[in-house]
Amino acid sequence: MSLFLKRKHDTSFNKLGATITEFVAGLAVSCVLIGSVQIIYEHQRVAANREAAQNFLLESASVQQQFFSATGGTRYADDAMLSGLAPALSKVTNYYAINRSPDNVEGELTSFTITAEPLSGTIQAGDGELSINHRGQRLAMNGPNVIGTW
């Protein structure tokens, strides 16, 4: 009777650790997950930098419009008058070159275009150029081609 009550010893439940196949499969899954998270993180960084540049362009255009109204609608501010935007500009210049045209104008400044061009060698390098003008047109450019608005 005691032979009937004895269980057969099963070695598959008695293992310690994992086989090399299980280890490689776990490692592969981990690598895929880490790679996916890294891609998502880089995408979020590019989007955050683009948003900072867009906010700077909007703030610059707002200051220009305020100056235009304050002067009775005769002129926009020149570069020296935009020095109050330096804190916002410092967040953007690591990834974008900010340009204003016309930049050196004698006399009346009756229009402006401010552009944020991605710097090569940064994570923004593949991002398009952003611009805003005195009419409030916000354009996203890829080289000379307008690819939409922002």
Image: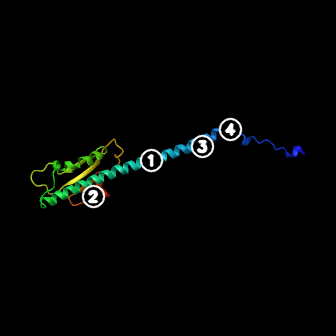
Sequence-first disc among 1 and 4: 4
Query: Mark 4 sits on what residue?
Result: 16
Q: Please tell me which of labels 2 and 4 falls first in the chain.
A: 4
Give the residue drawn at x 26%, y 47%.
Answer: 87
Q: Judge by depth and name the residue closer to the eye, 144 or 49.
A: 49
Residue 75 at x, y percent in the picture: 13, 57
Query: How far apart, in angstroms, are the residues tagged by discs 2 and 3?
Result: 49 Å
Residue bearing mark 1:
39
Amino acid type, residue under disc 3 in the picture: Ala
Give the CA distance from mark 4 to mark 3. 18 Å
Residue behind mark 3:
25
Q: As shown in the figure, which amino acid type bears the numbered disc 1?
A: Ile
- Splitting the image into 4 quarters, where does residue 65 fall? bottom left
Nearer the viewer's eye, disc 2 or disc 4?
4
Dot 1 and dot 4 residues touching (CB under 8 Å): no
* Viewport quadrant of the N terminus: top right
Mark 3 is surrounded, within 10 Å at the Cα level, by few (under 14), some (14 to 19) or many (20 or more) other residues, namely few
Res 119 quadrant in image: top left
Looking at the picture, how far across and down is residue 70, in whole percent?
14, 59
Reading the image, the residue beneath label 2 is 138
Query: Disc 1 on helix, strand or loop?
Result: helix
Q: Earlier in the sequence, mark 4 or mark 3?
A: 4
Quadrant in the picture for the C terminus? bottom left
Direction from residue 149 to residue 4 in the image, left or right = right
Q: Look at discs 1 and 4 and give the one toward the viewer.
A: 4
